[in-house]
Image (cartoon, helix red, strand yellow):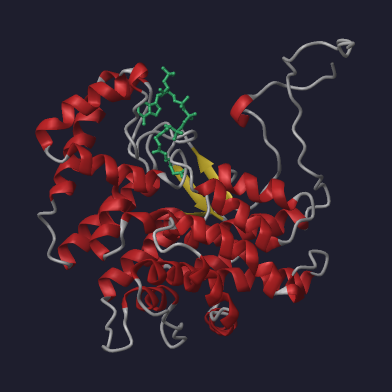
Amino acid sequence: TGCFTYDPGFTSTANCSSGITFIDGDKGELLYRGYSIDELAENSNFLAICYLLLHGELPTNEEFKTFRNTISRHTMVHEQMTKFFTGFRRDGHPMAIMVGVVGALSAFYHDSTDINDPEQRQTASYRMIAKMPTIAAMAYKYSIGQPFIYPRNDLDYTSNFLQMCFSVPCEPYIVNPVVARALDRIFILHADHEQNASTSTVRLAGSSGANPFACIAAGIACLWGPAHGGANEAALNMLEEIGTVDRIPEYIEKAKDKSSGFRLMGFGHRVYKNYDPRAKVMQKTCHEVLDALDKRNEPLLKVAMELERIALEDEYFVQKKLYPNIDFYSGITLRAIGFPVSMFTVLFAVARTVGWIAQWKEMIEDPEQKIGRPRQLYIGPPRRPFPKA
Ligand code: CMC
């Protein structure tokens, strides 16, 4: 009963209005606040893009300096939080740890959980952007049994993250500028993507009035799935499983066979039906990193390029408009930088945090905002009498 549309997967339902990100799937266009992703990736940096997504405009030099200083003030996490990490099994997946630790932030930062106070909302946003790299690096360090490394506010956002992941107290650490720039670009590419599954999760969680830290934890949990943020991990595992170029046709056939349950990971997108503009920048970045690190002959790159070439000529993929997405080349790049596969989705979460928080803030400030409450098509039994003994 009632009048509503049945729309599994929300393929044709808009749940909100938003001024943050625009995607034209047919043209393969992605804009943050009106600026195209390739121009931003080429000319800007991740922290400036955080400002853009949150505040609507690119920062002036002065605004950037102030923003950077404010974010720097929040990069450390409460010392007691280290105990959270040590409570997890060392072999636990870092995404499981991220969900737990980020969810726990609201127990430490009570003074920024009042969603009706604009100043507290702003503080929570800055805290999330500042602390995510620290928490992600701690999850990594814990998994390999190395000491946690404190943030260094003299470094830029991404270089600081790299040093928290890869430096050790007993040796000096020099950030490779090509690697830092590449990772910064990867963060830019992942910063927001309008109403994807994890962002919708954050909005839905936030629509009940839940605090922002809890909402971001919900987003992280959703991102973990292999059809979403987990795809970069799945894509690299797939390339490794294929291993050599001669085995590609076998996997192409398997992906075309519905009964196999196998899909080409890093291929296809709900919205992009022409190409994923992020994938282009990602592929270029991948080549830059492999060149800079002298890993040009990385065998998986050969497999990826050949797989892309064959798939793009194959009737099945052409007809269904399946193109490489951002995750196809990101795994190879991240692995070359030195991250283990289990950290790939964590890095996605670090970058997407600003998108989640900007969308959450936009929703809270929207006078038309209502609690998210989808309807259903009931297919269970009709009313029936309770059986008598
Ligand atoms: N390999 C083989 N066939 C595919 C693939 C693929 N990667 N993706 C879609 N198809 C087929 C699918 O079987 C279906 O065929 P049919 O119409 O005959 O039933 C058709 O293409 C449409 O697929 P769909 O699942 O209905 O499309 P969707 O919009 O619901 O799903 C997707 C989009 C990204 C979940 C899907 O393409 C997929 O599973 N890709 C692999 C996982 C992946 O790379 N995900 C990362 C997405 S980008 C980053 C992010 O959002 O986090």
Residue shown at 33% from the left, 21% from the top: 260
Let me know if residue 56 appears in the view: no
Question: In this picture, is 186 found above or below 382?
Answer: below
Asked whether 150 or 380 is in front, the reply is 380
Residue 188 in the image, given as x and y percentages of width and height: 44, 60
Residue 177 in the image, given as x and y percentages of width and height: 28, 76
Q: Is residue 355 left or right of residue 383?
A: left
Residue shown at 54% from the left, 66% from the top: 50
Q: Is residue 225 left or right of residue 216?
A: left
Q: Quadrant of the C terminus?
A: top right
Asked whether 319 or 103 is in front, the reply is 103
User: Which quadrant of the structure image shows residue 240?
Assistant: top left
Tell which residue pokes out farthest to the front in this image.
Answer: 389
Residue shown at 32% from the left, 32% from the top: 264
Residue 204 in the image, given as x and y percentages of width and height: 70, 46
User: Which quadrant of the structure image shows residue 306?
Assistant: top left
Asked whether 27 or 229 is in front, the reply is 229
Q: Is residue 284 left or right of residue 202?
A: left
Q: Quadrant of the N terminus?
A: top right
Let me know if residue 89 appears in the view: yes
Residue 242 in the image, given as x and y percentages of width and height: 19, 37
